[in-house]
Image (cartoon, rainbow, N blue to C red):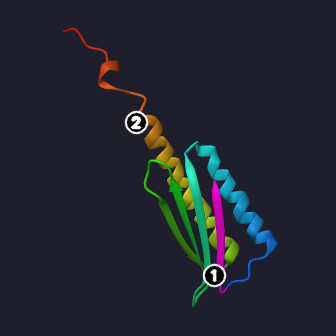
Amino acid sequence: MNVQIRAKDVTLTQNTREHVESALEAFQKFGLDITSVNCNIRAEKKGVNVEFDIHIGHSNPVVINQSDDDLSAAIDLAVDRASKALRRLHTKVTEHNTSSVKDLETLDA
């Protein structure tokens, strides 16, 4: 998984960078083919905007935008939203392959 973290008009401390990287490594638990994750952090008029752009093989990318006054709160909220989206995608992929019409039992009347 290729991880890029970019900050614009925000100073990114080592602790914040490690927090983002550890959160992004947690996305591997869903078992999806995540090829790259781009994290853009930029300052706005009111607070900070965090954007995750998660590219998944054989699927559309997942893009999460989160704004908040506090940088760590914005990161945590964006990670929660991305985890929810990846969990939904994982469920969609796994349940799609489990049942078919051939597996259904016929009822004799």
**Mark sitting earlier along the chain (2/1):** 1
Q: Toward the viewer: 59 or 20?
A: 59
* Residue name at image x 65 percent, y 74 percent: 6
Contact (CB < 8 A) between labels 2 and 1? no
* Residue name at image x 45 percent, y 40 percent: 93
Residue 106 found in image quarter: top left
For disc 1, the neighbor class at 10 Å (few under 14, some 14 to 19, many from 20) is: some
Dot label at residue 96: 2
* Residue name at image x 68 percent, y 76 percent: 71
Give how far across and how far down residue 63 sits, in percent: 49, 64
Is residue 36 a member of the stretch shown in magenta? no
Q: Which stretch appears magenta? A: 1-9
Q: Toward the viewer: 18 or 78?
A: 18
Dividing the image into 4 quarters, which one contains the C terminus? top left
Taken as a whole, is the magenta stretch helix, strand or loop?
strand
Q: 108 above or below 51? A: above
Q: Which residue is mark 1?
A: 69
Give how far across and how far down residue 77 sits, in percent: 60, 66
Dot label at residue 59: none
Question: Looking at numbered disc 2 in the image, what kind of residue is underneath it?
Answer: His
Q: Toward the viewer: 86 or 74?
A: 86
What separation in Å lies between label 2 and label 1 (alpha carbons)?
Answer: 40 Å
Q: Toward the viewer: 76 or 24?
A: 24
Give how far across and how far down residue 73 sits, in percent: 66, 72
**Looking at the image, which residue sits at the far left?**
109
